[in-house]
Image: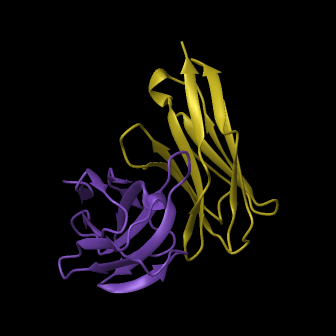
Chain colours: A purple, B yellow
């Protein structure tokens, strides 16, 4: 079975541009969450979605938005990119997104903002 | 909100010896504590987890202990091997999951 897949793997943007990152969860998983991982730090929670509804949001500005589609895949959008948005963006999936569930991560999208 | 502290930031261990990584958390409502291993160019991979109603859990060479009163939990890797070299993250979860800053583990030949 395929794991969590993310696209693209690498992306280079300039300040002020917007970006869309994509994620496909493990088959049968209905919850997707997004994380930002800056070099040398642990992942930081951005959003969680379950059944197309936002279930949680981390401490990120409104420039960050996301959505989940009927097939449970998800997009993360970032507008008006800043240099500080350069990071590895990780997507994780789980069956229902409840507290004690195991999270399975994709390999991430490495975003560089110049 | 929750805060997770992880120590040490770097750990070098002779192959075959044991490695211990320690984490503390601040929110007593946290009830799920997973550990992840991240290799270069990959996403974090869950290696073991423990729930708040359990004090210890073991899976082959890996074990995790949890002290809810003191709000700390630890990862123990025995008989370390070269493939154990990676960055390890602890995390604590209530409604949101909060990660520590990671420990870079080097296994020395």
x, y percent for residue B62: 55, 38
Given the current orientation, which residue lies at the most extreme bottom position? A53
Q: Residue at x 47, y 22 (%)?
A: B82
Which of the pair A103/A89 is nearer the observer?
Answer: A89
x, y percent for residue A16: 36, 69
Which of the pair B89/A42 is nearer the observer?
Answer: A42
- Is the residue B15 above or below the residue B97 in the image? above
Q: Residue at x 46, y 76 (%)?
A: A98
Q: Quadrant of the C terminus of chain B?
A: top right
- Is the residue A104 above or below the residue A94 in the image? above
Q: Is residue A5 visible?
A: yes
- Is the residue A20 above or below the residue A71 in the image? above
Q: Residue at x 50, y 57 (%)?
A: A43
Residue B39 lies left or right of residue B70; in this view the side is left
Residue B97 lies left or right of residue A35; in this view the side is right
Residue A47 lies left or right of residue B29; in this view the side is left
Which of the pair B34/B26 is nearer the observer?
Answer: B26
Q: Quadrant of the N terminus of chain B?
A: bottom right
Q: Quadrant of residue B67?
A: bottom right
Which of the pair A108/A94 is nearer the observer?
Answer: A108
x, y percent for residue A17: 31, 68
User: So how many labels did they put on this image?
Assistant: 0
Q: Quadrant of residue B105?
A: top right
Q: Quadrant of residue A105?
A: bottom left
x, y percent for residue A40: 55, 45
Q: Is residue A102 visible?
A: no
Given the current orientation, which residue lies at the most extreme top position? B109
């Amino acid at each position: 079975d395929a794991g969590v897949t993310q696209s693209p793997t690498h992306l280079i943007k300039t300040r002020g541009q917007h970006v869309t990152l994509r994620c496909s969860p493990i088959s049968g998983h209905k919850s997707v969450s997004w994380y930002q991982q800056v070099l040398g730090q642990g992942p930081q929670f951005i959003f969680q979605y379950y059944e197309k509804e936002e279930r949680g949001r981390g401490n990120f500005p409104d420039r960050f938005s996301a959505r989940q589609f009927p097939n449970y895949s998800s997009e993360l959008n970032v507008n008006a990119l800043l240099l500080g948005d350069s990071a590895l963006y990780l997507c994780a999936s789980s069956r229902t997104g409840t507290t004690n569930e195991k999270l399975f991560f994709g390999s991430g999208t490495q975003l560089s903002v110049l | 909100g929750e805060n997770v502290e992880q120590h040490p930031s770097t750990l070098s261990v002779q192959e075959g010896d044991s490695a211990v990584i320690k984490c503390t958390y601040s929110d007593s409502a946290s009830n799920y504590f997973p550990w992840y291993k991240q290799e270069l160019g990959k996403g974090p991979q869950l290696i073991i987890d423990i729930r708040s109603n359990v004090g210890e859990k073991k899976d082959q060479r890996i074990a995790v202990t949890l002290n809810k009163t003191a709000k700390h939990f630890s990862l123990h890797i025995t008989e370390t091997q070269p493939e154990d070299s990676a960055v390890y993250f602890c995390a604590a979860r209530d409604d949101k999951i909060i990660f520590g800053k990671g420990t870079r583990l080097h296994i020395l030949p």
